[in-house]
Image: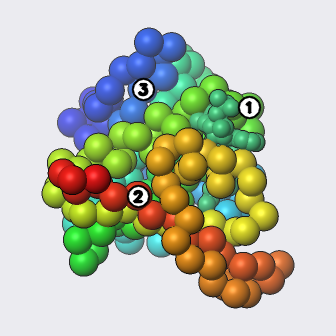
Amino acid sequence: MAITEQALEKLANGFSIARMTEHDLLEVVEIEEESGLSRWGWAAYYAELQGSNRDLMLVMRTPESKAPRVSHTLAAYIVARVGADELHINNVAVRNRYRRQGIGLTLLGRILEEGKRRGVAAAFLELRAGNTAALSLYEKCGFRLTARRKNYYSEPTEDALVMTIQLGRNA
Ligand SMILES: CC(C)(COP(=O)(O)OP(=O)(O)OC[C@H]1O[C@@H](n2cnc3c(N)ncnc32)[C@H](O)[C@@H]1OP(=O)(O)O)[C@@H](O)C(=O)NCCC(=O)NCCS
């Protein structure tokens, strides 16, 4: 197994957090599509994996991934980026069947820890105003609403909520 495929953290329930690799991308795109996120697609994830933010691309592997032939090995993924002293969380999505088990919260917590480790002052993200599941998740994680961008999203047109969390030592 390549070093990049080793688990960063094994969880008590058999799931594990690992860095995303290009072998994960077909499944990542599958989860993206079933989650209704704004589309990145294979090429954009692949390009991001070649850059300096690749350590901020994590997957949650299912316990079944140890079996030789399974239809999927990923339960979820998260993709973030550091720029201008801020951590920007771009995408987080959990497969339907694994939702409401704390996986989203765990992945967000892990990526915020990584942000702190890198010394960034704050993290932020945008979400569709009507995405109540994501809004609750981010509030539970400690994010606070800081702005609203009118008609930011298309297909369908919808406002974006901007949420922020302070990560600095005095936060
Ligand atoms: C949003 C999403 C990532 C949440 O993942 P998850 O693993 O199910 O979330 P968790 O189990 O960690 O939930 C943590 C908390 O978030 C809130 N939450 C999560 N899903 C919720 C829902 N459907 N309705 C209301 N609150 C919800 C709850 O407060 C929950 O705590 P609780 O279960 O103790 O009540 C998942 O629903 C998803 O992938 N949605 C589609 C993609 C998406 O919208 N991503 C965000 C884009 S900005």
The numbered mark, 3 or 1, whose residue comes first in the sequence reads 3
Q: Is residue 160 visible?
A: yes
Q: Position of residue 55 (x, y in %)?
A: 27, 53
Residues at marks 3 and 2, CA–CA distance in whole angstroms: 25 Å
Residues at marks 3 and 1, CA–CA distance in whole angstroms: 17 Å
Between circles 3 and 2, the one closer to the viewer is: 2
Quarter containing the N terminus: top left
Q: Is residue 66 visible?
A: no
Camera-side residue of 23 and 10: 10
Instruction: Bin the neighbour count of mark 3 within 10 Å (Cα to Cα): few under 14, some 14-19, many 20 and up.
Output: many
Would the CB of label 2 be found within 8 Å of ligand 1? no
Tell which quarter ligand 1 is in: top right
Residues at marks 1 and 2, CA–CA distance in whole angstroms: 29 Å
Q: Position of residue 170 (x, y in %)?
A: 21, 53
Residue for point 47% across, 48% down: 142
Instruction: Bin the neighbour count of mark 1 within 10 Å (Cα to Cα): few under 14, some 14-19, many 20 and up.
Output: few
Q: Is residue 110 left or right of residue 61?
A: left
Q: Image height check: is 26 above or below 7?
A: below
Q: Image height check: is 145 above or below 71?
A: below
The numbered mark, 1 or 2, whose residue comes first in the sequence reads 1
Give the number of marks. Answer: 3
Q: Return the residue at label 2.
A: 165
Query: Dot 1: what SS?
Result: helix
Query: Dot 3: what SS?
Result: strand
Residue for point 63% across, 26% down: 101
Q: Return the residue at label 1.
A: 97
